[in-house]
Image (cartoon, rainbow, N blue to C red):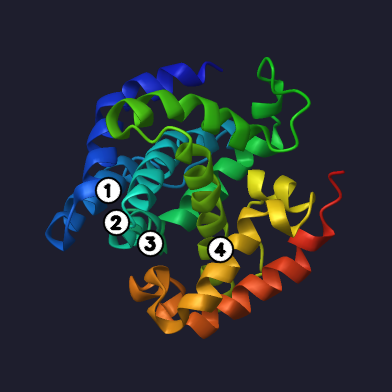
Amino acid sequence: MNLRKYEDIVSRLNTITILIARWGDREHQPVLERIISRLADANESRAGNTFWLGLRWYPILVLMYSGGIAALSARNYNSLATLLTTSLGNRATGQPPREAVVSTIQGILEVERAEMFKRLPGYERNYVPRSEYLLKTLQPEIDDLLFLGNSYEDLFDRFEVLFALTYADIEDRKGHHLWGPPGRFGWKNSHGAEMSPYHRLLNEAEQAGASWDPVASGLFAGSIDRFKEIADLYDKGLLSKLQWL
């Protein structure tokens, strides 16, 4: 499957998402909501091959990553929260609303189970081929628009930590198994805390306390204590158990 076709289709929409996510104020958040929700409208449940059905979430994943990195580059956590938690539902199928990050991750997992990203040339030996592919693929457009330079990789990793922990928090509150996709930060964590984007983020949250921007934007139920709880459970239950060395 040529992912480039999906990327080309949403290219202009991706540019809009990047610009709004970085510079948009509260009044612009409904535009981000509509971008994500309208793109997801056609992704209602239906019978068929789970791989192809899951692949329909790839364009939203691209927008979520690009917009999320752009938002983090300006510390625009309102935009990040909008991209991750916009409510998606389909009244025609009777599905209850779900947060965008939940629907997107659960959809793209069907693609990962088929090891599609691992089959891409040059990614066969990667521990997290989806993350590595997106890191390389998204950089040119984001850099052209935002001139992030050497900060791009750090912002990418930071986004993936918040992406995983937001999913873990939402699913845990619903009584589901606590999990979130361990991206490149998971591999880096296995090389020690000093290289770990995960532990850098935790240290930042510890220092900022209740005023930490992600919780001030409403993520993690707006509670620094909730963030610490989820981050600790994720670290002990998943991250520290990864055997990637």
49 vs 78, left or right, is: right
200 vs 61, left or right, is: right
Tag in front: 4 or 1: 4
Q: What residue type is labelled 2?
A: Ser
Residue identifier under label 1: 21
Q: What residue type is labelled 1?
A: Ala
Q: Do the residues labelled 2 and 1 touch (CB within 8 Å)?
A: yes
Give the mark nearer the N terminus: 2 vs 1.
1
Residue identifier under label 3: 85
| Dot 3 alpha-carbon crowd within 10 angstroms: few under 14, some 14 to 19, many 20 or more | some
Cα distance, mark 4 to mark 1? 21 Å
Give the mark nearer the N terminus: 3 vs 2.
2
Residue at the extreme left: 27
Give the mark nearer the N terminus: 3 vs 4.
3
**Residue 106 screen position, x and y as percent:** 56, 50
Callout 2: helix, strand or loop?
helix
